[in-house]
Amino acid sequence: MVGVLNLSEGSTIALHAALHLGKGQGAPVTTHSAAEVMKVSEAHLSKILQRLHKAGIVKALRGPKGGYVLNRPLTQIRLLDIFEAIDGPMKFNSGSITAPNCETDGCMLGSLLNEVNKLVVQRFELCLSEL
């Protein structure tokens, strides 16, 4: 069954990677070790971490003891920040049928889609520290 909310593989990996870095308590995490723990492609994770770096969410540390660390405290990184760094601004669709095409006084789905959108926004406003 297809879900109503589908996150890209990239944003899902990014969310998990940021949480993984947060568990490292400031110690640099290599792309290789994170990819092994998360069971994802190291090349794909590397590209995702580069995007998170460009967005200022993570910091890349060079050298033999380098890796990635969060660039801000867990209390200052929202799930939405991570999602938008990978997939761009979150957009919501209120329905696929415009009101003039509905034969009733309102959409047959009522306020369902708006309620779902509000729940998604509430969840994505959470910070990593709240997970």
Image: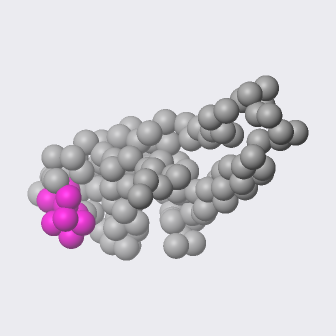
Total marks shown come to 0
User: How far from the left and from the top, in percent, is residue 88?
Assistant: 49, 36
The answer to whether residue 50 of the structure is visible from this angle is yes
- Tell me which colouring the rendered structure shows: one colour
Specify the quadrant that holds the N terminus: bottom left
The dominant secondary structure in magenta is helix
User: How far from the left and from the top, in percent, is residue 100?
Assistant: 79, 26
The answer to whether residue 58 of the structure is visible from this angle is no
Region rendered in magenta = 30-40
Pick out the residue farthest to the front: 103
User: How far from the left and from the top, in percent, is residue 95?
Assistant: 66, 39
Q: Magenta stretch containing residue 92, yes or no?
A: no
Q: What residue sits 72% from the left and 54% below the top?
A: 112
The foreground one among 79 and 112 is 112
Q: Quadrant of residue 15?
A: bottom left
Q: Is residue 83 above or below residue 120?
A: above
Q: Quadrant of residue 78?
A: bottom right
The foreground one among 3 and 23 is 3
Determine whether, in the image, residue 26 is placed left or right of residue 102: left
The foreground one among 73 and 38 is 38
User: How far from the left and from the top, in percent, is residue 65?
Assistant: 17, 61
